[in-house]
Structures are given as structure tokens and as C-alpha cells.
């Protein structure tokens, strides 16, 4: 029959042009998908409101660092118009936490070990008075600093600065010069009383009546190859006995 093949089946229909064997639609040309935006990091990931807060915080920190560096510079620079006019403000900012000590870089660096020691007369509960042995306050600080990766400013500088204050405001025969001399004595005395009440068993059992401070200076020996000879015997500077007031003996320092 017309339109049939030899087996009596209808011939395979002709596939329309442009279609695949399964009758799929012709492929269309699609635009490539746009690349995803990179993820925001840091300040860019914050909302505009928090970005403004972060920028303000950074600005405040920057101003603070700038002011700090300026104050430290003025404290160690030669006297000038600014440091003379605002000297009190500079000292209030720098001392004592941010003090800079340049003796290590001096043409002739400090070559001595200076230890500050104290003893006291203590009135005991039975009315008797005992004199303590010498307590090495500098050795206490050294033991607290040794092996400590972040020692406190108090351990490093409080006692040393107090002793420097005394020596700078006293004559060679240990007489105070002006009001600063008396102030330096009070400062060192309060430190010594506080330390004795903390560490000395006799002082903890009674009330300190008076105390005496001395320094023990020992030269650092030069290396053998230098040929330099320096005395190796300790040299003591003995301050007079200081009376401890009732406020200092039983007040907030205890």
C-alpha cells in the first residue's frame, strides 16, 4: 500500500529541521552568568553605622597615640618654649608610668648595682622595742622581676625612682634641700613602711616607730680583657633615722 513500507509499517516521520533526534528545542545562546561579588571582610563587612563608629574609634586612638608620643618627646627633649609653658602637663602625663631612662645609652653608662635597704625600730605588743635586721628591698624587686615576662611598673621603677628622688634633693651629708627634699623623704619612707609590713615578721607583729634607709653600691666588674681595675667592695650611704608618723605606721600603707 501506498505510504507503507515492505513490512506494512508506516515509514519513520521526517524530523523537522533544527530539532534533535528526541525532538528537543533548538539550543539557545544564553549570556554567561555574572561572577559572584567577593565576600566583604574587615570594616567593609560592617553596616555603614558601625563603619562610622569604627572610623571614629580609630581616629580617637590615632590622636591618643600622637599626643602620647608628643608628651614623651617633650619630656626628654631639651627645654623649649612649649615644654617650659606646659611643663606641669607634660610631667603629669609622663610620670611615673611612661618615664624614659636613657642612662643605658649615655656615653658612660651606669656601671654600678645600687641596692636600697631598710631597718626599723618596732614597738611590740608588750611595750618593748625591737630593731629589725636590714631588709634588701631592691632584692625583693629583683626576685619579683626575674623570670616574669611582664613585670609591673611598681616592681621595676617605684623604689628606684624614690631613691633617685632622695639623692637628687639631698646634699652629700644627707640634708634635704627645700620642700622637695622633705617630700622625697616622705615618699621613700612610706614605701619602706609598706614593704616592711608586708614582708618583715617583726614589723607585722608590732608598730613601726622609726626606720633607717641605706644604699649599698657595688661596682660592676669589667671584663678580664679590658685591663680596667675597679674597687669590688660595697660602699654604703646611710641616711639618718626617720620617725614614722601614726598615720604612716597604722594607716593605709599597712
Image (tube, rainbow, N blue to C red):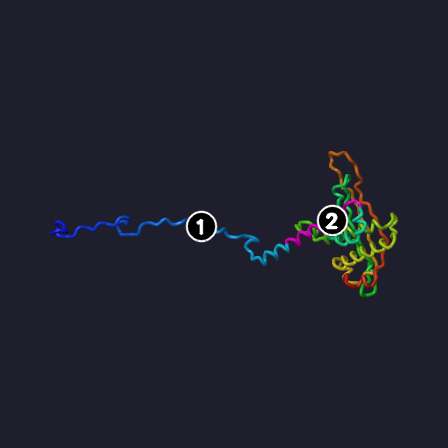
Looking at the image, which is closer to me, 201 or 64?
Answer: 64
Q: Quadrant of residue 249?
A: bottom right
Task: Assign a secondary structure to mark 2.
Answer: helix
The residue that appears at 78% across and 47% down in the rendered structure is: 114
- Is 78 inside the magenta-drawn segment? yes
Looking at the image, which is closer to me, 21 or 46?
Answer: 21
Q: Nearer the viewer, mark 1 or mark 2?
A: 1
Q: CA distance from mark 1 to mark 2?
A: 55 Å
Dominant secondary structure, magenta: helix
Residue 240 picture location, percent across and down: 86, 53
Say which label, 1 or 2, has the lower sequence index.
1
Residue 226 picture location, percent across and down: 75, 34
Stretch in magenta: 58-79
The residue that appears at 30% across and 52% down in the rendered structure is: 25
Q: Is residue 146 left or right of residue 242?
A: left
Residue 87 picture location, percent across and down: 79, 51
Task: State the mark number for residue 194.
Answer: none
The residue that appears at 74% across and 41% down in the rendered structure is: 105
> In this figure, which residue is indicated by the disc labeled 1?
34
Looking at the image, which is closer to me, 175 or 125?
Answer: 175
> In this figure, which residue is indicated by the disc labeled 2?
72
Decide: few, some or many residues near mark 2? Use Cα within 10 Å; few <14, some 14-19, many ≥20. Answer: some
Task: Assign a secondary structure to mark 1.
Answer: loop
When the figure is inspected, residue 222 is found, relative to residue 87, above or below; the finding is: above
| Quarter that holds the C terminus | bottom right
Q: Is residue 44 left or right of residue 235?
A: left
- Is 167 inside the magenta-drawn segment? no
When the figure is inspected, residue 204 is found, relative to residue 5, above or below; the finding is: below
Residue 250 picture location, percent across and down: 79, 64
Q: Is residue 177 left or right of residue 199?
A: right
Amino acid at each position: 500500500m501506498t505510504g507503507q513500507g515492505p513490512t506494512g509499517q508506516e515509514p519513520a516521520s521526517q524530523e523537522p529541521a533544527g530539532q534533535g533526534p528526541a525532538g528537543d528545542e533548538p539550543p539557545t545562546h544564553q549570556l554567561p552568568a555574572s561572577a559572584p561579588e567577593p565576600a566583604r571582610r574587615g570594616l567593609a563587612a560592617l553596616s555603614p553605622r558601625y563603619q562610622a563608629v569604627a572610623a571614629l574609634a580609630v581616629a580617637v586612638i590615632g590622636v591618643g597615640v600622637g599626643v602620647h608620643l608628643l608628651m614623651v618627646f617633650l619630656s626628654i627633649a631639651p627645654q623649649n618654649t612649649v615644654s617650659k609653658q606646659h611643663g606641669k602637663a607634660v610631667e603629669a602625663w609622663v610620670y611615673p608610668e611612661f618615664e624614659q631612662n636613657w642612662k643605658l645609652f649615655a656615653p658612660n653608662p651606669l656601671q654600678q648595682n645600687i641596692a636600697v635597704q631598710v631597718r626599723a625600730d618596732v614597738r611590740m605588743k608588750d611595750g618593748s622595742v625591737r630593731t629589725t635586721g636590714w631588709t634588701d628591698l631592691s632584692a625583693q624587686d629583683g626576685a619579683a622581676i626575674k623570670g616574669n615576662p611582664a613585670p609591673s611598673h611598681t616592681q621595676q621603677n617605684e623604689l628606684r625612682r624614690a631613691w633617685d628622688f632622695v639623692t637628687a634633693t639631698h646634699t652629700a651629708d644627707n640634708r634635704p634641700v627645700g620642700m622637695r627634699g622633705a617630700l622625697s623623704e616622705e615618699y621613700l619612707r612610706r614605701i619602706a613602711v609598706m614593704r616592711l609590713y608586708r614582708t618583715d615578721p617583726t614589723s607585722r607583729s608590732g608598730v613601726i616607730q622609726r626606720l633607717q634607709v641605706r644604699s649599698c653600691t657595688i661596682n660592676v666588674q669589667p671584663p678580664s680583657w679590658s685591663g680596667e681595675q675597679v674597687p669590688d667592695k660595697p660602699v654604703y650611704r646611710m641616711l639618718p633615722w626617720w620617725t614614722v608618723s601614726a598615720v604612716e605606721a597604722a594607716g593605709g600603707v599597712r
